[in-house]
Image (tube, helix red, strand yellow):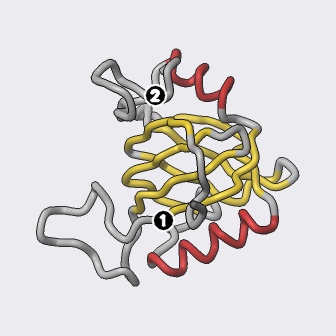
């Protein structure tokens, strides 16, 4: 994961990761942990959608989203469940989840911790003043460099 823009197949083809091993954990801790989240793109569809059975936007619980970090790295997150509390139900609804995450970004939120589930799936903890605000349980991810925030030329 040292080259954030390639997986050996050519430029711009980031390697999709599914399981967090020790090396990936260390790389994420060293490159993205502690960085401020400054932008978001939340996709209406998800790679986790079953073919022909896409949930309605109001019922969606798994999201694909891009988090833009202050160090010009982009975390593309796939099949992500979002929780405001690890003991609560996941956020539901495309518009509702987008509004909540954008409000956190506007108020200042940092990717504070990188963790893993018992199944070695990635968990990102977004915090304000080191107080967790949002937990992202991620099914797959890539790390890439970004040039422009969404909506910029």
Furthest-front residue in this view: 153
Query: Label 2, on which residue?
Result: 20
Q: Specify whether residue 47 is in view.
A: yes
Number of other residues with Cα within 10 Å of mark 2, as a class: few under 14, some 14 to 19, many 20 or more: many
Q: State the image quarter where residue 150 is shown.
A: bottom right
Looking at the picture, does residue 50 appear above or below residue 113? Answer: below
Residue 5, label in figure: none
The picture places residue 30, in percent across and down from the top left corner, at: 68, 23
SS of the residue under disc 2: loop
- Whole-number angstrom distance, CA of label 2 to CA of label 1: 23 Å
Left or right placement of residue 104 versus residue 10 in this view: right
Give the residue at x 60% y 28%. Answer: 28
Number of other residues with Cα within 10 Å of mark 1, as a class: few under 14, some 14 to 19, many 20 or more: some
Q: State the image quarter where residue 101 is shown.
A: bottom right
Residue 42, label in figure: 1
Give the residue at x 76% y 38%. Answer: 34
Mark nearest the camera among 2 and 1 is 1
Furthest-right residue in this view: 129
Q: Nearer the viewer, residue 3 or 30?
A: 3
Q: Nearer the viewer, residue 27 or 15?
A: 15
If the image is split into quadrants, where does the C terminus sit?
Answer: bottom right
Q: Nearer the viewer, residue 76 or 52?
A: 76
Give the residue at x 63% y 73%. Answer: 100
Looking at the picture, does residue 17 appear above or below residue 59? Answer: above
Left or right placement of residue 23 versus residue 32 in this view: left
Left or right placement of residue 114 versus residue 143 in this view: right
Q: Are marks 2 and 1 in contact (CB under 8 Å)?
A: no
Q: Specify whether residue 17 is in view.
A: no
Give the residue at x 16% y 72%. Answer: 53
The picture places residue 24, in percent across and down from the top left corner, at: 51, 22
Q: Nearer the viewer, residue 52 or 40?
A: 40
């Amino acid at each position: 994961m040292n080259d954030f823009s390639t997986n050996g197949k050519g430029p711009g083809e980031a390697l999709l990761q599914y399981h967090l091993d020790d090396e990936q954990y260390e790389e994420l801790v060293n490159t993205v942990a502690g960085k401020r989240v400054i932008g978001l793109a939340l996709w209406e569809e998800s790679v986790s959608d079953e073919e022909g059975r896409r949930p309605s936007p109001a019922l969606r619980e798994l999201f694909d989203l891009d988090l833009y970090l202050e160090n010009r790295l982009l975390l593309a997150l796939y099949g992500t469940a979002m929780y405001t509390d690890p003991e609560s139900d996941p956020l539901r609804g495309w518009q509702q989840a987008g509004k909540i995450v954008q409000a956190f970004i506007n108020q200042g939120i940092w990717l504070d911790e990188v963790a893993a589930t018992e199944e070695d799936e990635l968990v990102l903890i977004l915090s304000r003043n080191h107080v967790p605000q949002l937990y992202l349980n991620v099914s797959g991810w890539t790390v890439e460099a970004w040039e422009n925030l969404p909506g910029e030329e």
